Image (cartoon, rainbow, N blue to C red):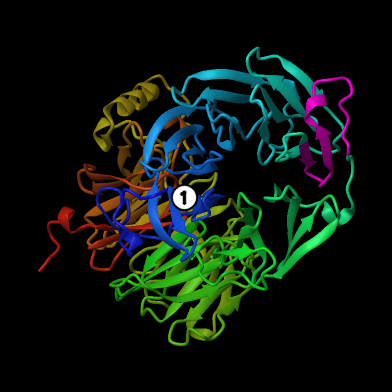
């Protein structure tokens, strides 16, 4: 790669933004890694696109393939002139690296059939791809995108658990394709005739690696339990096909393999913070590294002389095998799923809770990371909330503990509140800040007295899993949304349920807004007396003036009157919009914003964020935002900024001033 078609602006928060967004925080969850053959670049495939990093500095120089993102596999051709990318939808592209030009596109057929393995033929005329199931292996012509061959296995042989990847390898002459098959086997196919020439057995677990030796004479197959077999290539399709090596010493049952430039079979393993590279056939340690974090991911360079290593802190560093330590430049800002976003009451800080167990606090003006809090358990954080005065931050995680940090003493450990017996999903301070309420997977609400050292006032009885909670503006009532049951309204002072939100579809046509075709289907269904089945409410919000509750119900947004708890309006979401997984009212209460989840059947590249006028149900604006589910939405206190946190590991910031006529922009 001699040049990249992008301005190398050091502020990557503005690279390849969707229309309407002003910044992106985070670079996306890492899914795949690949060194360039010339040793100059490291490619990082993520849920938002493909990042190119200069190895010498570990600084980003380009961001490709952002139209869909959701990358799941990468592969360079041997010379490095071509690059193949595959995504979680089964889409594949071949790129001319030097000119940053897509040469051809291919598509694996099947729902949720992500690409797991990509292999170029030796003459670089063909590409083979496998998915997350043993259903089909495809071979395409690279230049035209034409399908040359498709190899399948019997449906009844599909294992109960999907393999992490289906390994593939071409024979040296490119006429034969070798691929992993069910029942701990691999098969050999003739590409021209489509015939399966051989079916190799002997492994005691599913085959997860296939590797050709540089001399082209041997094939290495490795299974899930670490069993390693070495085969002679020219005997694979004969009756004499038996592994030369059928077992290896315990120490070499490792997890990643490659050949070095001088033909030595290397293997790498990680155990906690200890990282080891082995000479496999000599059963000898080549090098050992003690890393600063538990090693979570690593990848060999093409020459086998270098690895990229990542730990629990999501930082990537390169290590020259044999050096005492990794290279000092590091890649940062690839975070895990963003479960929750919140602005501080003064609007100066944006907090984000991640499934990695971290909470990031950023200065809103400069977007710089100021403070990081970590849960010792590193369990997923699903919900965070600021106290009304802004000096406390509460968080819930899967380890059943509510944590509260004192933001005036950020170096101090958090207060830990225990009592829940199930994973925690959501937490909220009362409007006065005197109470803190937490909700768990058993549907139990915990009420904590903030002013008396977080004394536990009550735990409600178990019921259905609680997904979301919201306080009324006066703090007297709390509404909770559940996985299966109707949303419930509570008197927070005595912990009693006082109402259930109506879930019967109204027969009054005037209450419906939005997609006309969906409205007509609903009304006709009600006229026929069809059973009224709906998806339970999972996202819930009180309006700032307290007169409305909004919740998502399947492909609709419902509004309830807080005096009668009857339905006031139903917005039917348009075609191409997944269910609203996140909802938030604007601070003025005039608008509601919904954030969608991604659905395979919709055939869209990005999920939508929609701005609704509350009084009319009109869709005022639509932003095509993240490539996958929106987990959380939050307005700044003055309503000028909207933050969206996503399953892709990023946060997008949106300027809302153009859409709100009442906001003073001067």
Whether residue 595 sits left or right of residue 545 in the image: it is right
Q: Residue at x 73, y 56 (%)?
A: 268
**Vertical position of residue 237 compared to residue 179: above or below:** above
Return the residue nearer the eye: 38 or 457: 38
- Tell me which segment is drawn in magenta: 219-244
Q: Position of residue 67 (x, y in %)?
A: 36, 41
| Label 1: few (<14), some (14–19) or many (≥20) C-alpha neighbours in 10 Å | many
Q: Residue at x 66, y 39 (%)?
A: 165
Does the segment drawn in magenta span residue 227?
yes
Q: Position of residue 94 (x, y in %)?
A: 45, 34
Whether residue 142 sits left or right of residue 164 in the image: it is left
Q: Residue lying farthest top?
A: 193
**Vertical position of residue 331 compared to residue 101: above or below:** below
The residue beneath circle 1 is 487
Q: Is residue 422 visible?
A: no
Q: Residue at x 38, y 69 (%)?
A: 475
């Amino acid at each position: 790669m001699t040049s990249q078609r992008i301005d190398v602006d050091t502020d990557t928060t503005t690279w390849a933004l969707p229309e309407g967004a002003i910044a992106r925080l985070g670079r996306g969850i890492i899914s795949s890694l690949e060194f360039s053959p010339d040793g100059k670049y490291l490619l990082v495939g993520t849920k938002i696109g493909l990042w190119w990093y200069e190895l010498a500095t570990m600084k980003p120089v380009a961001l490709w393939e952002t139209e869909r993102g959701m990358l799941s596999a990468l592969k360079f051709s041997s010379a490095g002139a071509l690059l193949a990318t595959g995504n979680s939808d089964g889409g594949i592209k071949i790129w001319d690296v030097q000119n940053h030009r897509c040469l051809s596109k291919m598509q694996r057929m099947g729902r949720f059939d992500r690409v797991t393995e990509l292999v170029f033929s030796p003459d670089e005329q063909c590409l083979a791809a496998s998915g997350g199931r043993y259903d089909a292996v495809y071979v395409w012509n690279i230049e035209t995108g034409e399908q040359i061959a498709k190899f399948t296995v019997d449906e009844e042989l599909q294992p109960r658990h999907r393999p992490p990847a289906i390994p593939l390898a071409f024979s040296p002459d490119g006429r034969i394709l070798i691929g992993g098959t069910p029942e701990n086997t691999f098969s050999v196919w003739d590409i021209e005739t489509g015939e399966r020439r051989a079916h190799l057995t002997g492994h005691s677990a599913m085959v997860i690696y296939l590797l050709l030796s540089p001399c082209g004479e041997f094939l290495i197959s490795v299974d899930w339990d670490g069993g390693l077999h070495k085969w002679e290539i020219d005997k694979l399709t004969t009756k004499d096909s038996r592994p030369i090596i059928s077992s290896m010493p315990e120490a070499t049952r490792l997890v990643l393999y490659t050949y070095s430039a001088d033909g030595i079979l290397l293997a790498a393993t990680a155990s906690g913070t200890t990282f080891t590279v082995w000479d496999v056939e000599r059963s000898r340690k080549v090098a050992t590294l003690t890393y600063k974090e538990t090693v979570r991911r690593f990848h060999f360079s093409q020459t086998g002389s270098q690895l990229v290593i990542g730990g629990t802190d999501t930082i990537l560093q390169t290590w020259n095998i044999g050096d005492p330590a990794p290279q000092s430049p590091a890649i940062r800002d690839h975070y895990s799923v963003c479960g929750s976003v919140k602005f501080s009451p003064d609007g100066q800080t944006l907090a984000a809770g991640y499934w990695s167990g971290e909470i990031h606090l950023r200065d809103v003006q400069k977007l710089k990371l100021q403070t990081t809090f970590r849960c010792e358990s590193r369990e997923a954080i699903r919900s965070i909330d600021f106290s009304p005065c802004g000096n406390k931050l509460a968080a819930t995680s899967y380890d059943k503990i509510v944590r509260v940090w004192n933001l005036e003493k950020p170096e101090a450990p958090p207060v830990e509140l225990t009592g829940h017996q199930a994973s925690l999903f959501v937490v909220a301070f009362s409007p006065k800040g005197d109470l803190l309420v937490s909700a768990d997977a058993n549907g139990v609400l915990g009420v904590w007295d903030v002013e008396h050292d977080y004394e536990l006032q009550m735990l409600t009885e178990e019921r259905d899993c609680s997904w979301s909670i919201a306080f009324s503006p006066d703090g007297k009532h709390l509404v909770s949304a559940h996985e299966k049951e109707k949303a419930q309204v509570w008197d927070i002072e005595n912990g009693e349920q006082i109402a259930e939100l109506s879930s019967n579809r109204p027969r009054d046509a005037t209450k419906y807004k939005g997609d006309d075709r969906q409205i007509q289907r609903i009304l006709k269904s009600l006229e026929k007396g069809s059973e009224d089945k709906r998806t339970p409410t999972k996202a819930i919000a009180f309006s700032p003036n307290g007169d409305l509750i909004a919740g998502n119900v399947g492909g609709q947004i419902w509004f309830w009157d807080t005096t009668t708890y009857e339905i006031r309006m139903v917005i039917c979401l348009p075609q191409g919009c997944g269910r609203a997984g996140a909802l938030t009212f604007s601070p003025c209460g005039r608008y509601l914003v919904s954030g969608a989840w991604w659905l395979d059947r919709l055939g869209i590249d990005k999920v939508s964020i929609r701005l609704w006028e509350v009084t009319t149900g009109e869709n005022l604006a639509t932003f095509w935002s993240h490539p996958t589910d929106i987990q959380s939405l939050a307005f700044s206190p003055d309503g000028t900024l909207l933050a969206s946190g996503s399953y892709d590991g990023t946060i997008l910031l949106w300027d809302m001033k153009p859409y709100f006529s009442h906001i003073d922009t001067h």
